Image (spheres, helix red, strand yellow):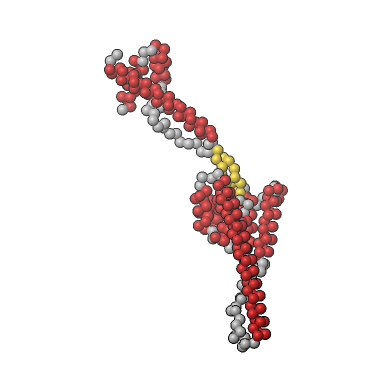
Amino acid sequence: MSEQQQEDEILDLTEDQEVEQGDDQQQDDAEGDDDQQEEEILQFVGDEAEPEQETDLVRHLRQQIRERDKQLHASRKAPQAEQLIEVGEKPTFEGCDYDSDRFDQEFNAWEERKEQRRQQDQRLEAAQREQAQQWEQVKTGYATAKAKLPFADKEQAEATAFDSLSEIQQAVIAKIADNPALVIYAAGKNPTRLASLAGIEDPLKLAKEIGKLEATMKVTKRARPPQPDRAVRGSAISASTTDKHEQQLEAEADRTGDRTKLIQYRREKRQASA
């Protein structure tokens, strides 16, 4: 066997291996595509459900809206933040014109105010800690809900929504919505709904709008669009380019052990495509 024939056979064997690798890669890609044929999307099913088609979920959401309205209404009627107790300066005997009875009276009153202020400070600090803990729970709940969202563009949608919503509006959504992360995503993906939410400054009205929005949201699945054909990297000859004549030559080479015709045919193909 000549040196040229040895080189041709080595090249031919290399091409056969690359074709097999290409077949394996295409099979792996096909199996992977089977696992990714569906994706989850957010849909809006309509702002209002027809009365005869009202579901238990819609009735439940409407009941939640009424309860939230009551809570917000009650919070708006809540008394203003309590006024801090002024302790004042500690009385002195000289300031009481050296009147012992007056001094005792003013000093006792000062001690009482001082104790009341101490108790007030403790109460307010405890309330602040409780509010901070509640807000941390809200933020944790939001982060958990966001992590469960199946959408690849959720970060971008969140950024879009946060750019338009005030911190107060964001807080109302985080506290009021059953799934605040999904509401934020829906707002970020829908400019009309985002503008509607951003234009509501009244927390009560905002809570109503959140409830309506949640009643229309639905996460559903759809088939993924087909992926464009792509060449298999690392493959000099794809299996799809093997013609019938070449297949016949391969079968004959396997049967006779003589690969001369197959090598010559592939050499001609390479020269023709060069």
Residue located at (51% from left, 33% from top): 32
Residue 56 located left or right of residue 8? right
Residue located at (63% from left, 58% from top): 207
Residue sitting at the far right: 52
Q: How many marks?
A: 0
Q: Nearer the viewer, residue 125 or 118?
A: 118
> Does the rendering let one see residue 185?
yes
Q: Nearer the viewer, residue 103 or 149?
A: 103
Is the residue 32 above or below the residue 79 in the image?
above
Residue 46 located left or right of residue 51? left
Residue sitting at the far left: 3
Residue sitting at the far top: 256
> Does the rendering let one see residue 239?
no
Image quadrant for the C terminus? Answer: top left
Q: Position of residue 150 (x, y in %)?
A: 55, 44
Residue located at (66% from left, 75% from top): 112
Q: Position of residue 75 (x, y in %)?
A: 66, 64
Residue 22 located left or right of residue 167? left
Is the residue 162 above or below the residue 93 in the image?
above
